[in-house]
Structures are given as C-alpha cells and as structure tokens.
Image (tube, rainbow, N blue to C red):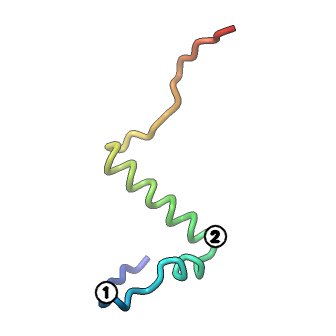
C-alpha cells in the first residue's frame, strides 16, 4: 500500500463517509483488521486478549 498525505483547509476537508462507502467490503475489513493489530501491538504490548482457561461449573 502506498502512503499518501494530502493537506486540506479546514472548510475543504473531504467527507470520510464517502471515502469508506467507495471501498469494497474486503478493503473495509482489511483496514479494520490492520487497526486492530496496531492496537494490540501498541496498547497490549503484543499480548492478545484470551479467554480464561479454567472455568468453574456451577449447578
């Protein structure tokens, strides 16, 4: 993916909704997955949240 930076004046900013509606479902899901991976690496130090391994059965 090529990185592109564009400068806009405050009153001339493009609409984000239009941008994402032009993308396919797979591109949207890939962007979401990339954000999730960056979040895990930055905030959780690479440790993915997991389920508790030991459960107690209550009847």
Q: Is residue 20 above or below residue 8?
A: above
In front here: 53 or 13? 13
Q: Secondary structure at mark 2?
A: helix
State the separation of the CA atoms marked 1 and 2. 29 Å
Residue positioned most to the front: 11
Q: Residue at x 50, y 66 (%)?
A: 31
Residue 2 in the figure: left or right of residue 57: left
Residue 50 vs 3, above or below: the answer is above
Residue 25 is tagged as 2
- 26 or 22: which is nearer to us? 22
Density class for disc 1 (Cα within 10 Å; few <14, some 14-19, many ≥20) is few
**Circle 1 — which element?**
helix
Q: Quadrant of the C terminus?
A: top right
Left of 29 or right of it: where is 1?
Answer: left
Q: Where the N terminus falls, by quadrant?
A: bottom left
The percent coordinates of residue 30 (x first, y second) are 54, 65
Instruction: Locate residue 55: give its quadrant.
Output: top right
Of residues 21 and 50, the one drawn nearer to the viewer in this rendering: 21
Residue 51: numbered disc: none
Residue at left offset 64%, top offset 70%? 25
Mark 1 lies on residue? 10
Query: For the point 54% across and 82% down, which residue is it?
Result: 18
Query: Which residue is the extreme one toward the top?
Result: 59
Answer above or below: position of 13 versus 47. Answer: below
Q: Residue at x 43, y 54 (%)?
A: 37
Q: How many marks?
A: 2
The residue closer to the viewer here, 10 or 45, is 10
Q: Quadrant of residue 9?
A: bottom left
Q: Position of residue 21 (x, y in %)?
A: 59, 78
Q: Quadrant of residue 38?
A: bottom left
Mark 1 vs mark 2: give the one in front: 1
> Where's residue 3, x and y in %?
36, 79
């Amino acid at each position: 993916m090529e990185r592109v930076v564009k400068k806009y004046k405050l009153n001339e900013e493009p609409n984000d909704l239009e941008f994402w509606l032009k993308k396919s479902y797979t591109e949207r899901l890939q962007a979401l997955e990339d954000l999730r991976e960056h979040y895990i690496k930055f905030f959780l130090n690479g440790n993915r949240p997991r389920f508790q391994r030991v459960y107690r059965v209550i009847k």
